[in-house]
Amino acid sequence: MYWQKVSEKEFPALIDFLLSLEPYCVGFTSRLRADGSASLPSRRDALIYALHEGTEKGDSAKSQAGGERIHGAVLMTSRGMMMPVHQPGLKVPAHSINEIMDRFYRYCRKLYCLIGISGTVRQYENALQERIDTRIRYHLMRRYSKIQLPRTIFAEGLRIASLTEKEIKSVYQLEVEYQHEEVLVHPERFSPAAHMVYFRNTVREQFILYAKLDGMAVGKAGTNAIGFHNSQIGGVFTAGPYRGRGIARVLMIRLLEEIHGWGQDAVLFVRKTNKPAVRLYEKLDFDIIGEYQITYTQLD
């Protein structure tokens, strides 16, 4: 097996490969959408390599012509993230793993996280130059757009609205609480100012809803990656004092109405230990389709 940087000529074959697995890699495919169409990211932002059968010397001409079947792909970002995607059940030889990791470190000085299906991510861990800090495993869940949504029952006085930049400050405390409770590996390193910049960009690029009750923002939910046929949901959070009132359920149904209205299925990954969230998603007809993993490396 050999890796080859994806060119414009090979890009259609890459898209075909990824779309066949999109529920498992929306974070990857979302980075290939620009203004509603598919395109390669700039080298400044990311590189993509495709995995082929055979040897590069013997088969590179065939691959360049778009005739070599793709068995896997890796997205590596300039910010130190790697997303590998394999055909189901594929075991990549160690020398091929080492080869692509060498290419990563020539592109980016340090790898901060590996993201993908657990069995795929684990194949890359032994080739890391950094020490592993934390592994977090999640249920990967999917909901088909063809499944009818349940009725929405509102708590009295609850208002649901789409989040715009004008309301960011009123929702930001919720976002900070969500990060500390669900995302951050090292909360002591969190920078409110830096994250505000990130959150503002997210609001511009994604579809996010928030719930308001008693004049306060009490819950939120939105997309964090929009693919070609699937949208990934993230950031689902209800403030502690308002839990148990069905606010997350209302937000999710409204969000799913929007996503399914685009003609897309919905996927999400949720910590296995978050039993209340798993129960909510199962009641909304999400099915577990795999185990997702994020491996974080130690920072200098």
Image (spheres, helix red, strand yellow):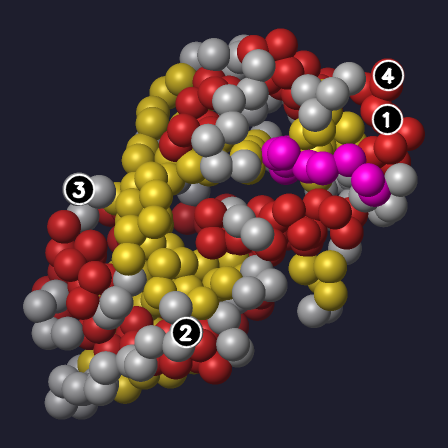
Q: Earlier in the sequence, mark 1 or mark 3?
A: 1
Are the residues tagged 1 and 3 within 8 Å (C-beta)? Answer: no
Per the image, the residue denoted by label 4 is 57
- Helix, strand, or loop for circle 4? helix
Q: Which of marks 1 and 2 is in front?
A: 1
Are the residues tagged 3 and 4 within 8 Å (C-beta)? Answer: no
Which residue is drawn at the image coordinates 51% and 28% (left, top)? 90
What separation in Å lies between label 3 and label 4 (alpha carbons)?
47 Å
Q: What stretch is highlighted in magenta?
A: 66-77
Per the image, the residue denoted by label 1 is 60
Are the residues tagged 4 and 2 within 8 Å (C-beta)? Answer: no
Per the image, the residue denoted by label 2 is 145
Magenta span dominant secondary structure: strand
x then y, percent, for residue 84: 56, 33
What separation in Å lies between label 2 and label 3 (alpha carbons)?
27 Å
Q: Is residue 257 above or below residue 297?
A: below
Q: Nearer the viewer, mark 2 or mark 3?
A: 2
Q: Earlier in the sequence, mark 4 or mark 2?
A: 4
Q: In which quarter of the image is residue 161?
A: bottom left
Looking at this view, is 208 or 253 the one in front? 253
- Helix, strand, or loop for circle 3? loop
Q: Earlier in the sequence, mark 1 or mark 2?
A: 1
Per the image, the residue denoted by label 3 is 273
Q: What type is the residue that disc 4 sits on? A: Lys
x then y, percent, for residue 48: 71, 37
Residue 196 visible (yes or no): no
Residue 110 visible (yes or no): yes
Looking at this view, is 200 or 57 the one in front? 57
Q: What type is the residue that disc 2 sits on? A: Ser
Q: Quadrant of residue 96?
A: top right
